[in-house]
Amino acid sequence: MKAKKTLREGYTTGACATAATKAALTALITGIRQTEATIYLPVGRWVTFAIESCEIGEASAAATVIKDGGDDPDATHGAAIVSTVSWAEQPGIHLDGGKGVGRVTKPGLPVPVGEAAINPVPRKMIRETAREVLEQYGISRGVNVIISVPDGEEIAKKTLNARLGIIGGISILGTRGIVVPFSTSAYRASIVQAIQVAKVNRCDHVVITTGGRSEKFAMQQYSHLPEEAFIEMGDFVGFTLKQCKRLGIKTVSMVGMMGKFSKVAQGIMMVHSKSAPVDFSFLAAIAERAGAEPELVAAVREANTASQVGEMMWKAENRRFFEILCDHCCLSALREVGGGITVETSLYTMGGQLLGKAVRDDAGD
């Protein structure tokens, strides 16, 4: 049997910012350029970070750590995380974001509007580490700490930050200090955050999509809804639906394509390509119910992909097939959350043709 390759862990932007702060502050105090910094992570372990560069000025010092995401596909992998430290007139540790670190402009995030997008755990890590360094050298002066990411504004374009109301750069994140490769936790956390932002911005109706293309079609279909109402759920259909219900969203519109929504119609709520195969007998039964000719039903049963089935049914001008499939998606969604919400499903082709739509109102009184 082939041995499973162990994936390499990486470190969060918060951990990198903390290590850079320790190096910069140590350099400011000692006048010695630092080549490494060891910090304690929330996950409960000590880690030593290499310092890419360390510059010492008359009244400040700056240190850079290169973000290593391990084997996790992360937009911030390879980014330079810089901490610039200087003495403050006021006592205490004053933390802010510089170039490439976003600013929060919408409520609903763990950081107040107007502040730098440095999340609570990294804030605590940076402050505690700075405090320890000051105590180690017996210093009681105040310190300014500015975290910056030179390429942050460009990197942020690959993230959902603008949608969440984080403008001008990336967020400094991390609750554990480490990045677990291909972990679903970070993606799930971003989904919950997006729903919270929608809720705080008074969106009772959200639109959940499986990817960027389906989101584009959804935004055209639901053009009356604000940007915050659109949430990319990826493969996490069941999880997203449950979070919508938990957070009090009244109407959820699902927008996607044949491949993944054929699985949702079957009741599969984690629609990764490896999660479960499309059941072509199930699709053939829907085709039969939609009044398709026996030859077409047989062809559906023998199809290779769900997209191929979609093409067959569209060519045959059988719109009823898509309506029934969408209705199955609505029913699966309501079963998943135990009812109590209104669910809509819209099905598109890759080119943006609306194939069908269905609505199930189970919101109760």
Image (cartoon, grey):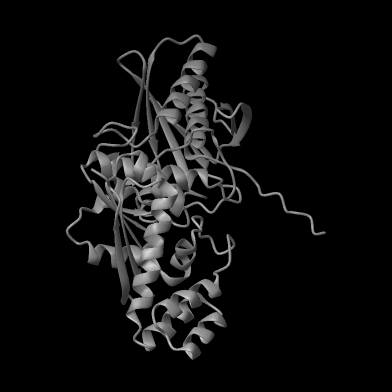
Horizontal relation, residue 350 to residue 79: left or right = left
Point out residue 2 in the picture as x, y percentages from the top left corner.
80, 59
Point out residue 117 in the picture as x, y percentages from the top left corner.
34, 37
- Near-viewer residue (107 or 300): 300
Residue 8 can be seen, yes or no: yes
Quarter of the rendering containing residue 323: bottom left
Determine whether 346 is above or below 114 in the image: below
Point out residue 261 in the picture as x, y percentages from the top left corner.
44, 65
Residue lying farthest to the right in this orientation:
1
Point out residue 79 in the picture as x, y percentages from the top left corner.
48, 48
- Near-viewer residue (201 or 110): 201
Residue lying farthest to the left in this orientation:
224
Residue 100 can be seen, yes or no: no
Which quadrant holds the C terminus?
top left
**Residue beneath the point at 45% across and 51% down:** 238
**Residue beneath the point at 46% across and 41% down:** 81
**Residue beneath the point at 57% across and 27% down:** 39
Which quadrant holds the N terminus?
bottom right
Quarter of the rendering containing residue 33: top right
Determine whether 37 is above or below 53 in the image: above
Q: How many marks?
A: 0
- Near-viewer residue (177 or 288): 288
